[in-house]
Image (tube, helix red, strand yellow):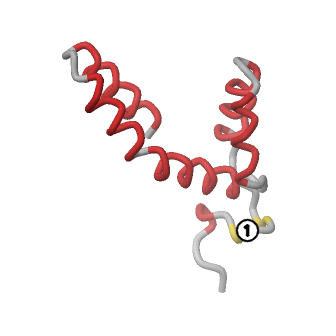
Amino acid sequence: MFLWVGILNIVLTVLGLDTISAIVSLALLVPSLSIAARRLHDTGRSGWWQLILLIPIIGLIVLIVFLAQDSHDVNDYGVNPKLGVPT
């Protein structure tokens, strides 16, 4: 999702539609945060780890590593979606 939002913002900015780019960014902010929180929950972390983005550069790198890790089998937030429905 982050990739598509970034590409869309670049295209709108190049076309000179900065206002529309800002509106689209604000409209997609909440869904982006919720997707990242869900992914962090799958790795056994709290969604509050997104606040690490407040640390320049290093925070982005750490968050990307956290989001790229594989899901745990079972964590505080539920069962790994790759395992299927528990019986």
Residue under label 1, please give it. 77
Looking at the image, which residue is at 69% across and 50% down? 40
Place of residue 53 in the rendered image (x, y in percent of width and height, measured from the top left): 69, 31
Looking at the image, which residue is at 26% across and 32% down? 20
Image quadrant assignment for residue 16:
top left
Q: Which of these two is toward me, 55 or 84?
A: 55
Q: Which of these two is toward me, 83 or 56?
A: 56
> Residue 86, relative to residue 58: is it above or below?
below
Q: Is residue 55 left or right of residue 60?
A: right
Residue at the extreme bottom of the image, as rendered = 87
Image quadrant assignment for residue 1:
top left
Please tell me whether mark 1 sits on a helix, a strand or a loop: loop
Looking at the image, which residue is at 74% across and 50% down? 48
Looking at the image, which residue is at 76% across and 20% down? 58
> Residue 7, relative to residue 73: is it above or below?
above
Q: Is residue 53 left or right of residue 25?
A: right
Q: How many numbered callouts?
A: 1
Residue at the extreme left of the image, as rendered = 15
Place of residue 10 in the rendered image (x, y in percent of width and height, measured from the top left): 33, 19
Place of residue 32 in the rendered image (x, y in percent of width and height, measured from the top left): 50, 46
Pick the quarter of the image with the C terminus: bottom right
Q: Is residue 29 left or right of residue 86?
A: left
Residue at the extreme top of the image, as rendered = 14
Q: Amino acid at mark 1?
A: Tyr
Label 1: few (<14), some (14–19) or many (≥20) C-alpha neighbours in 10 Å: some
> Residue 58, relative to residue 45: is it above or below?
above
Q: Which of these two is toward me, 16 or 46?
A: 16
> Residue 67, relative to residue 18: is it above or below?
below
